[in-house]
Image (spheres, helix red, strand yellow):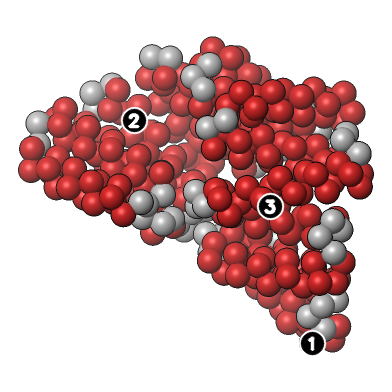
């Protein structure tokens, strides 16, 4: 399968041809549109992806109804884009209605229902409802391991989400134990350059850093950043920016302020271009820069970034 610009080019051509031949409301055309939107999103073109998915969702509902599997899939894809942009109020009804519809139509343990339950658990984590997120995540991992096996890609995805949750709620020992083993499984099953491998490796490093193991974390971050830059060679995707930020945090913990500054600034440049300026990831790296210049003794730069941070927080 093609990836990157070539995939987008092929999908754009396929979309225009099928739309011209079959019409915009044809089921196949809408599926191609959704695939094109996901390719746009993966390339960092989230605004174009959102526009296509919103249009496709309207057509899916009009043609098939709110509970049709195709409609549910588009809801999930749109919700995912909105979640990354911290637009939780818009994403919530899409996630929650998807799970209800899938459970009613397919059953609680159907492969697609479990996928949507996993996504909803991740969303609850973003919303700060950690108890509900953990309960749902553990249940999904258990069900997927039972039905699909531990090395199924869907099981790996749910396990990844649970590891991310453990990182967020500061259960670092659980996260480290799970992430280290999961990284090995992802590399074996999916390959070293798969997105899941890069994400779980970064998660592993962040847990080690929070646990006070900065040198171990730095080595892990070097590897995960390399995976991200191979996947996104133009270095415009927000995941590359975030990878620079977490490596910068390891440098900061080790007192290597020059390296930390370089990573923070590059991370901020990428994140600020790829995401809304008020996104929590952008705000976080600005907080890192304020702390860095305060610790390294550069009051002018600290004041400049503190002012910029305050203005951004006020706007958000």
Dot 2 surroundings within 10 Å: few (below 14), some, or many (20 or more)? many
Residue annotated with mark 2 = 249
Under tag 2, what secondary structure?
A: helix
x, y percentage for residue 92? 63, 47
Camera-near label (2 vs 3) is: 3
Task: Specify the farthest residue to the bottom.
Answer: 20
x, y percentage for residue 112? 83, 44
Side of 169 relative to 70 (left or right): left
Between discs 2 and 3, the one toward the N terminus: 3
Residue annotated with mark 1 = 20
Between discs 1 and 2, the one toward the N terminus: 1
Q: Give the quadrant of residue 155.
A: top right
CB under 8 Å between discs 1 and 2: no
x, y percentage for residue 9? 65, 73
Residue at mark 1 to residue at mark 2: CA–CA distance: 51 Å
Q: Nearer the viewer, residue 48 or 89?
A: 89
Q: Measured along the vertical axis of the image, is residue 17 above or below residue 302?
A: below
CB under 8 Å between discs 2 and 3: no
Q: Measured along the vertical axis of the image, is residue 63 above or below residue 134?
A: below
Q: Give the quadrant of residue 246.
A: top left
Residue 94, numbered label: 3
Residue at mark 3 to residue at mark 1: CA–CA distance: 30 Å
């Amino acid at each position: 399968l093609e990836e990157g610009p070539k995939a987008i080019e092929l999908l754009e051509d396929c979309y225009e041809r099928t739309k011209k031949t079959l019409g915009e409301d044809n089921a196949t055309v809408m599926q191609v549109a959704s695939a094109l939107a996901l390719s746009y999103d993966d390339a960092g073109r989230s605004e174009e992806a959102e526009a296509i998915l919103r249009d496709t969702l309207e057509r899916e509902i009009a043609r098939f109804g709110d509970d049709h599997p195709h409609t549910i899939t588009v809801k999930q894809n749109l919700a995912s884009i909105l979640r990354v942009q911290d637009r939780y109020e818009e994403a919530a009804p899409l996630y929650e209605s998807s799970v209800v519809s899938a459970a009613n139509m397919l059953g609680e343990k159907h492969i697609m229902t479990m996928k949507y339950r996993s996504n909803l658990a991740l969303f609850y984590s973003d919303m700060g409802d950690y108890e509900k997120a953990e309960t749902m995540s553990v249940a999904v991992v258990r069900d997927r391991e039972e039905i699909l096996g531990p090395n199924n890609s869907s099981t790996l995805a749910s396990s990844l989400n649970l590891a991310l949750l453990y990182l967020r709620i500061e259960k670092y020992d659980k996260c480290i134990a799970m992430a280290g083993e999961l990284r090995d499984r992802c590399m074996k099953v999916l390959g070293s350059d798969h997105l899941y491998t890069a994400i779980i490796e970064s998660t592993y490093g962040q847990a080690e850093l929070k646990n006070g193991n900065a040198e171990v974390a730095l080595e892990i971050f070097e590897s995960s950043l390399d995976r991200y830059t191979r996947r996104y060679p133009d270095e415009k995707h927000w995941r590359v920016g975030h990878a620079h930020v977490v490596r910068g945090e390891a440098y900061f913990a080790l007192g290597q302020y020059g390296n930390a500054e370089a990573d923070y600034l590059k991370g901020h440049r990428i994140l600020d271009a790829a995401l809304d300026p008020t996104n929590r990831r952008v705000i976080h790296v600005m907080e890192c820069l304020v702390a860095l210049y305060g610790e390294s003794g550069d009051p002018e730069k600290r004041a400049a970034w503190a002012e910029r941070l305050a203005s951004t927080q006020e706007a958000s």
